[in-house]
Image (spheres, grey):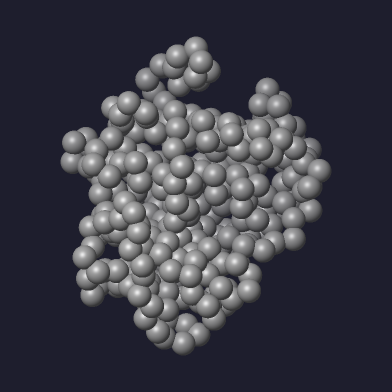
Amino acid sequence: MNGVVPGALHSGDQTCTFTVWAPAARQVALRLLSPRRRDVPLIPGERGYYSAMVSDVPAGTRYVYVLDGVERPDPASRYQPEGVHGPSEVCSRGFHWTDGAWQGLPLTDYVIYELHVGVFTPEGSLDAIVPRLAGLRELGITAIELMPVAQFPGERNWGYDGCYPYAVQHSYGGPLALKRFVDACHAAGLAAVLDVVYNHLGPEGNHAGDFGPYFTDRYRTPWGPAINFDGPGSDEVKRFFIENALYWFREFHFDALRLDALHAILDMSAEPFLADLSTDVERLRKQTGRKLYLIGESDLNDPRLIREKARG
């Protein structure tokens, strides 16, 4: 299933392409808040997408979308420097990676250390973890699994009620700090695993429903409304989360994603989200030659979750 990459994609020459899926709104505009305030009309496209390529947009520009006169952060925001209620920020995609020779580890070699960024060090930041990686390696650890880092309310949190899946938590250091962390892991011979949550979004700061049918009332999860993976508009919702997974692999060089509570991803469609996700990650693995993995958490004891697609 091909689709559009949502969010603000910066080209490096102060040009930025903004793309948002907003079929629920009658009028959609982009409001740039810095370095100078201006409104930019977005061009409606197919399937409820709006987009515009805008010049004179340096990295660090703050922005919101205006839906029928109401300001909202970008659901695919890459950075929320003022938290879940503040504007989104355009991020540079550039980074000096030093892990070009890293191809990953066989999954059978993974000895995983699950780590909470906020409590692992007194500083509670990604950068503060880096000097301690060698010590973890000496323990025999071969893979570091970060608990969720998607933007959540406040400064410290378990991470499972994040509401901006693409945005790295500002109090942990943001996207550049996460790239530095992964690069340092690979330099230390450690695989990097990220815990992601695709079964719900947290309640505070969650405005995705104002843009489109991200949620469904056909099902409920223990944490609130279920993600709409099989109702009207669900193709674009699936694409939003599939692109999120690919984003972590491509932009941040993660080796594996740990998928939270698969039993709470309720999807009765002919082409289930998890199957499409697996297909796209496998395609990326072949394109890059890297060892990439999806690691699922589920209490269903269903062997189909780990069986090769060809075997059903």
Q: At 47% from the left edge and 82% from the top edge, which residue is drawn?
A: 34
- Rendered-image quadrant of the N terminus: top left
* The quadrant where residue 281 appears: top right
**Which residue corresponds to the image point at 61% horizontal and 48% vertical from the top-left?**
250
Left or right of residue 67: residue 111: right
Q: In percent of the image, x 26 and y 56: which residue is there?
A: 23
Q: Image check: 271 left or right of 188?
A: left
Q: Is residue 228 left or right of residue 106?
A: left
Q: Is residue 300 above or below residue 44?
A: above
Please state the horizontal and vertical placement of residue 123, each as a whole percent of the image: 60, 62
> Quick one: which residue is furthest to the top in this view?
311
Q: Quadrant of residue 83?
A: bottom left
Mark count: 0
* Residue ID at (67%, 50%): 182
Quarter of the C terminus within the rendering: top left
Q: Residue 225's x, y, as percent?
A: 24, 44
Query: Depth check: 57 or 302 in front?
Result: 57
Residue 179 drawn above or below residue 295: below
The answer to whether 107 is drawn above or below residue 238 in the figure is above
